[in-house]
Amino acid sequence: MNPDLAFLVEVLVGGLLSGVMYALVAIGFVLIYKTSGVLNFAQGAMLLFAALTFVSLTERGVPFAGAFAATLGVMALLGLAIERAVLRPLVNQPPITLFMATLGVAYVIEGAAQLAWGTQVHGLDLGIDDTPIDIAGILVSRFDLFAAAVAGLMVAVLSLFFRYTRTGLAFRAVADDPLAALNTGLRLPRIWAAVWIASGIVALVAGLLWGARLGVQFSLSLVVLKALPVLVLGGFDSILGAIVAGLIVGAVEKLSEVYLGPVIGSGIEGWIAYVAALGFLLLKPSGLFGLRSVERV
Amino acid sequence: MPSPKPRLRAALATGAALFVLAGAARADEQHFPLQSYRVGPYAAGGTGFFGGFIDYLNLINTRDGGVNGVKLTWSEGETQYEVERGVEVYERLKSRPGIAAWNPLSVGIAYAMIDRITKDKVPLITINHGRTDSTDGRVFPYVFPLLLNPYSETSGIVEYLGSREGGLDKLKGKTIAVLYHGSPYGKETIPIYELLAKKHGFTVEQIEVPHPGNEQQSQWLTIRRLKPDYVVLRGWGVMNPVALKTAQKTGFPANRIVGNVWSNSEEDVIPAGEAAKGYVAITTQASGAEYPVLKDIIKTVYDGNAGNLADKKRIGSVYHNLGIVNGILNVEAVRAAQAKFGQRTLTGDEVRWGFEHLRLDEARVAALGAKGLFHSIAVTCANHEGDGRVTFQQWDGAKWSVVSDWIAPDWATLRPIIEASSATYAKEHGITPRNCAAEEAATHAAATP
C-alpha cells in the first residue's frame, strides 16, 4: 500500500477505535437522560469510583472475578443511593436544578473515592496484551480492538434489553411520556432506580477500560469531557447515536490533528470535536439520532 | 477563702507569665507555611513532596533539637493545586510569625505569588520549576528556582542524549521529537530546544498534547512517521503514562523516550505498567532509601510513628526524596542565615540572605547524609538556581536506577537568554537590578573587624 495512504488509514483506524472509547462513556449519560431527562454530570466521577474500587480490591488480594462482582454491587448501591437521596427529592424540578445536583454529586463522589481509597495512582492490568498487531503495515492496538468489542457487546445487550425485556420496555415508555407511563401503572421510582443501577454498571465497564488505558487516577473523571461532543452529535437519548457519534468524533479529532495540525498549529484535537459538535448543533439540534421534541401549544 | 482581688492579681500575673513564655517560645521558632495539595488530581505528588519536606523538618527537630536550638514549625493549607486556593492560603498564613520561606511546588501558584512575596520580603522556593528568568537574583531577589530551571533541564537532557550517542557532536543529523504538555509550562522550553538544535546540528520536532493528555494517538502516529531517534517527554500528570502506553501501541521503544523533571516519578510510570519498562527520565535527586539521611528519617521519625507518609512503601520515592532535598536546602539556608544574623528566629529577608549564601559542596552534602541523593548547590546573589547537577534514571518495572553520571547543563549558553528575559521583566515592572558585587562587598566590609 502507498505509505501515505497506509498512514491515512492508520490514523483513521486509530481515531475510530478512540471514538469507541468515548462512546463507552457517552452511553452512561444516554441511559440516564433517556429515562429521566437528567444530564448526569457525575458519570465521570462514577467511572473513577468504579475503577478505583476495583483496583483497590485487587491490590488487597481479592481475585479478579470477586473484585468485579463486589464493585458491581458497590456501583449498584451507589446508583441507587444517588437516585434515592438526590434525584427523587428533586423530582419535577427544572432540568437545570437536576443538572446542578449531579454536578454536586460528582464532587462528593470524587472526594469520597479519595477518602476511601487514597490518592495514589494505580496501574490496572486487565490481562490484555497492548502490543500492536501489524495488518499490511498498519499497526492496530489489540487493547483498542478489545475495547471496541466490549462496546459493541454492550450496545447489543442494551438494545436487546430495551427492545425485548419488560423492564426495557418500561424504560422506553417512561422516556416517551412519564405521565402516560405512570397512568398505565408503571412505578416510576422503581424504574429510575433501575436505570441508575444500570448506569453504575456501565460506569464500571468504562472505568475498567479507561483505567487500563490511563491508569487509575483522579483524572479518570475528566474523560467525560470527551463524551460531551459525542452526546451533542449523536443525541442525548440514543445509544446507537452515541456509538456512531463516538466514531465520528474520534476520526475527526485524529485526522484534524495529523493533517490540519501542521497548518493551523498542533494541539487542536482538544477543541476540534467541540467545533464539529457545535456546527452540527446548528444544523440538527437534536443530534444525529436524538428524538426531536415536539410540543403542542 | 481568698478575696477576689488577690485572685485577680494572681490570674493576671499567671496570664502575663504565660504571655511572656509564649512570646519566648515563638522567638525560638522558624515557621514554614505549606500550600500543600493532598486531595485532588495531583494529590499523589503533593503527599509525597510535602511528606518528605515535613519528614526532614521533623528529623531536624527530633534529632538535633531544631536548627541551633531554633525549632522548625509548619502549617498546611490545602490548595488542590489550584492557583486561587494557593493565593488564599498565602493571604491566610502570611501573618504567622517567623516565616522562613514559601514552597508551593506549583508553577501557577508560584507565578501568582511573585509580586506578593517581593512586597512582603519573604523567599519563594520553586525547586526544579518556576520562572526560568527568576534565576537572575538581581531582578528577582526573593525567588529561588533551586537546583534546576526549565532551560537547564532542557540543556541537561540534550547533554545526556549527546553522551548516549558518544558526544554532543554525534547529535548532528539526529532527530529529536519533543512531546510537550499544551500549557505555558509545556511551551516554555520550545525556543531552547530550537536554540540547542541549531547549536548541535540536530533536527527538533515539537508536538503539543492538549491538556490533560489522556488521548495521544495522533501525536504518536505523527512520531511514528517522523521516525525520530529520541522522544523527549515534557509531560504532567496523566499525560505521562498515556504517552508511554501509546508509544508501545505505535511501536516506539521506551528506552528511547526521555522524560523531563515532571515526568520522572513512580506515579508517571506505574499506571503504564509494562509499557514503561526501560523508560529514562531526568532528575536532580536519586530515589531510594539507602542514603544515611533517609535511614535517619526512618529510624527517628517513622519508627517514632511521626512519619508524614501514610504508606511507608513510598519512603524514598521520587517525590518524597524531592521533598527531603527541599527540606535540606531550606534548613541549610536558615543555618547560613543564622551564622550571620544570630541563632534566633529570622525574618524572611534574613533567610533570603541565607539562600543567597547556600553553598553545599559534595563534602557538605555527604556530611548531611545525602551523598548520592543530590550533587551540590552554590547559590549566589545573581544565580538563584545554584548550578545544580542532573542525573538520569531508568525504570525497570519496579524501581528507578541511576544510569548516568551527574551532568552539568550548558549554563554559559543559557545565561544570556535568562538575563535578556529578566531585563525585559525589570523594564516592564520598573525594577532596577541589584548590584550584587556591591552588596557582597558591603557584606564583607561589615563582617571585617
Image (cartoon, coloured by chain):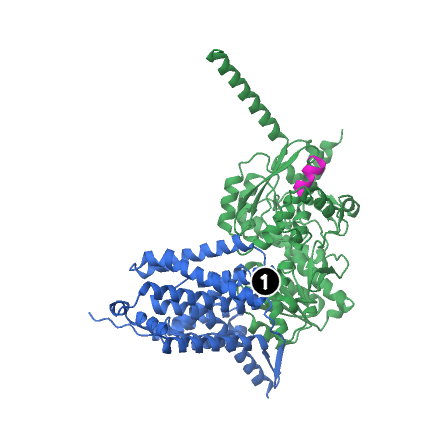
Pick the quarter of the image with the C terminus of chain A.
bottom left
Q: Residue furthest right?
A: B363
Specify whether residue B257 is in view: yes
> What's the amino acid at mark 1?
Val
Pick the quarter of the image with the N terminus of chain A.
bottom right
Spot occupied by residue A275 in the image (x, y as percentages of width and height):
42, 70
Circle 1 chain: A
Q: Which chain is blue?
A: A
Question: What colour is chain B?
Answer: green
Pick the residue in front: A274 or B319: B319
Was residue B58 drawn as part of the magenta stretch in this picture? yes
Residue positioned 80% across, 46% down in the render: B363
Write the start and end of the magenta stretch as one range.
B56-65
Q: Residue furthest bottom?
A: A1
Spot occupied by residue B183 in the image (x, y as percentages of width and height):
54, 61
In the picture, measured across the screen, residue B364 lies left or right of residue B321, that is: right
Pick the residue in front: B24 or A210: A210
Residue that carries the numbered disc 1 in the rendered image: A62
Relative to B267, is B351 above or below?
above
Task: Name the chief secondary structure element in magenta.
Answer: helix
